[in-house]
Structure formats: C-alpha cells, structure tokens
Amino acid sequence: MSKKKQQTTTESLPLVAIELGSSGVRAMAARRTGADMLHILGVEESSKFPCVDRGVVTQSSNAGFMIVEVLRLMSNRLMVADLPTAFVLLGGRSMKTVQVFAKRDQVHKREIPQRLLDEMEQECKRKIEERNPGVAVLGLVPAFYVLDGIEQDEKPSPEQRALWVEAHYVAFVGRKELETQVQKSFDQAGKSIERAFVRPEALLSVFAAEDGYGAVQDGCAVLDFGAQTTTLSIFKGNEYLFNKVVPQGGLHITRVIEQQGVSLALAEKLKCQYGYASAAQVRKNLQMKVPAIPEVGGVLQLSSEELAYTISFKLEEILKPLLEVISEYEERIPTLYITGGGSMLNGLAEFLQQKTSMHVIFGAHDRLLDVTTEEQFYEPKYTALIGALIMGADYRDDHKNQPVKEPGWLEKFKTQTEIMFTEQ
C-alpha cells in the first residue's frame, strides 16, 4: 500500500520575497532571528528580459522565466531542493487607496479567531471588486477594529471576546492587470504567491518597527524613489491620508543625461558618482571628458555643474506634483522619509529639506537586521523587500501549518517544457 505524500507547509520553508521591477526580478531570502529582526540569507537577481513598465508586468512569460531563475539560484544558495512559493511586492502607476469595512455578529460573546478576520478581509475585497469590475484590490491594510462598540488600533488578541466585530481597512486598489499579470507570471513559473504586499505597506512596516511606531503614529510621509515610478504615501494614526504614483523615477533622470550623447550605462555612472540634486551643492566644478556614443563619435566635455543642472531640471519635474501635496500636509505631518534605489542621489535629502518644513530623513532598515548581516543588505534599494519579509513572518505566525498553494498546472507544464527546450 503506497504512502500518502506529505504536504509541504510554509513553516518548513525559508522566508523569500520577490520584487518585479524595471531592471528585472529580485529575490531576497531571510531567517527570522527575533521580533522584527532578520538575518538575510542572500539576494538573487535576473535582468535577462525587459518585462515591467512602471510597475506593470508587460511580458508575463519573460517575468515567469526570471522568477524560475532567481528561485533556482536561491535554492542552490540555501541548499534546499525547491522554493515553491514566495511573498511578492505589488505597486504601479494606477494604485490608489479607498476605505472599506466589514461587520460580524458572532451570536454569542466569544474570542475572535483568525479565520473570522480572514473572512472579513475577503468580504471587503469582494465588495470593491464586484462594484468595480476593472479594479483589483492589491492589498488590505487594517486601519482599526471595533469590538462591541469600542475602537482599538491593535488586532484583537486571543484573550479578547466580543459579540459584534468590525474590521476597518485601507484598500490599495489598481487596474486589474497589475494583479493578474503578476499572478500569471507566477503561474507560468510553476510557483505560487504565498501573500502579496503593496510597497507602501511594506515600507511603512519597516519605519514603524525602526522608530518604535512613534513618528509613524504622529504622522509621516514616505517618498519612494524607484527606477520608473516615484510614490508618495502619507500616513497618520493608522490611516493612509494620501497615496500617489508618478510614472517617472531615477531611470528618467539617467535618460536625460543620456541625451547629452553618452551611453545609458555611462549616464547612470555619471549620475551616481558625480551627480547632485542641485548645482548649488557642487563644491568643485570638475571638467570631465567622456566618450560619446558611436553615432556622435569623439569625446564630450561635461562639467559637474552642467550635470547637476541637468539632474535638477528633471528632478523638479518629477517631484513638482508630489511637493504640492506635501505642502498641504506639512503642518500636520512632521517627518518625511525618503527611500528606494533612487534616493541615493547625492544631495537629495538637502534638496528636499529646502522644499518643505518636514524633517527629511533616510528611511533605513538598519535595526531590523542582525549584526551578522552583510553590509550590502543595508542599502535602501532593499528596504521594501525587508518590509515584505517582516510582514511575511507575521503572516506565517497568524497562519500556521498552511499548505503551500499549488500554481496553475497547465501553465506550470508549459513553462517547464519551454525552459527545458530553451536550455537544450
């Protein structure tokens, strides 16, 4: 008599989070070493194919191929047979927030099980998507709960009991393609999504843990500089006050430098090494001779000040609509966090400090990494992934012994067949 195959549970797997961006697919794995504390096990990246445009997957087959690749590389790094599932970060240019809530009569005063909270969350998701067929709920963030008429910010504890239970959420919504294309990419990779988190939610979880929730509770704005998008989120007292995505980012600054007649790779190098957010920050006006692209030929002369003027012109254009919003909230919100790969532009914090009365600081995740973590993982381009891993660990605590979700079998077979013939 054959033995029944034992089903894999998520607790037996390392924490893995995946980010799909304009530069490719990035996976990060970690082990939890304490409350809000991680040891990073490694990062794997693939940029073989362009497959994401401003947060939206445009080629799910290419994205699926790279998801397979980064998880295979991560499996080899961690010396595990397979990584069938991962947490994933969602975001994009159409993302907005709406308020929604669900209510339950438990008939008798009793404990509030996780199952009930999950059902209420799904009800809220259905409410929005049924009323708006072209919209998908990308993430639901608990705002507050009401137990028998008494409001509280914290999730109900196992000791609490109530007859009437209300759960109020902030829903991050976007065009349905934001969600369906990511899901399709994972299906074609033969992998499952354990849980999806929106970038603002992941970033806020990091900053809340970093400062002991003080600045976040008092109110904060988060400016997330990506390659193709820049996102502003404003939060106070468990409530998202504002969320806006501008479809331009660090790559667009690099593209403007490229128009001087240099390659994209050299333009990025010039921006990172010699670029400043404004010409006033340039202490020494270096005169640089750089090779032009073959179509132009020869050598170009470029100064540090000229480079800074080029960068600041584009930076002003990207930030203009977001700074207008920040000015409306600066009397209520004391702190502005800046984060993301684009936040490493020289002088950006000083540039923003001149534009607002908020206290501008880099949104770091230093306190969430144990002392044995390699220095490279402290870079701000990893902050959102760190947040996804922290939230993923909390999710597993609430959903113990969960079986690993199975992906779509047809897509899995097709993708594995394609990969087999590609490799041959």
Image (cartoon, rainbow, N blue to C red):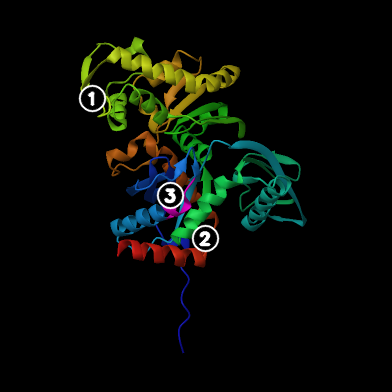
Q: CA distance from mark 1 to mark 2?
A: 62 Å
For badge 1, the amino acid type reads: Gly
User: What's drawn in magenta, residue-wise?
Assistant: 58-64
Q: Quadrant of residue 384?
A: top left
Q: Is residue 153 visible?
A: yes
Up the image or down, 118 lies above or below 379; here it is below
Q: Residue 11 in magenta?
A: no
**Residue type marked 3:** Ala
Question: Can residue 236 be seen here?
Answer: no
| Mark 3 neighbour class, 10 Å CA radius: few under 14, some 14 to 19, many 20 or more | many
Residue 400 has which mark? 2
Residue 353 at what x, y percent from top left?
45, 16
> Of helix, strand and loop, which one carries label 2?
loop
Q: Earlier in the sequence, mark 1 or mark 2?
A: 1
Label 2, label 3: how many angstroms apart (C-alpha)? Answer: 18 Å
Task: State the residue at coordinates (47%, 34%).
Answer: 207
Image spot of residue 34 (x, y percent): 41, 48
To which quarter of the image does residue 278 belong? top left
Residue 93 vs residue 343, the one in the foreground? 93
Residue at figure coordinates x 57%, y 47% from the top left: 177
Q: Nearer the viewer, residue 65 or 301?
A: 301
Up/down of 364 relative to 43, above or below: above
Dot label at residue 17: 3
Going by the numbered disc 2, the residue's amino acid type is: Lys
Q: Disc 1 designates what residue?
A: 297
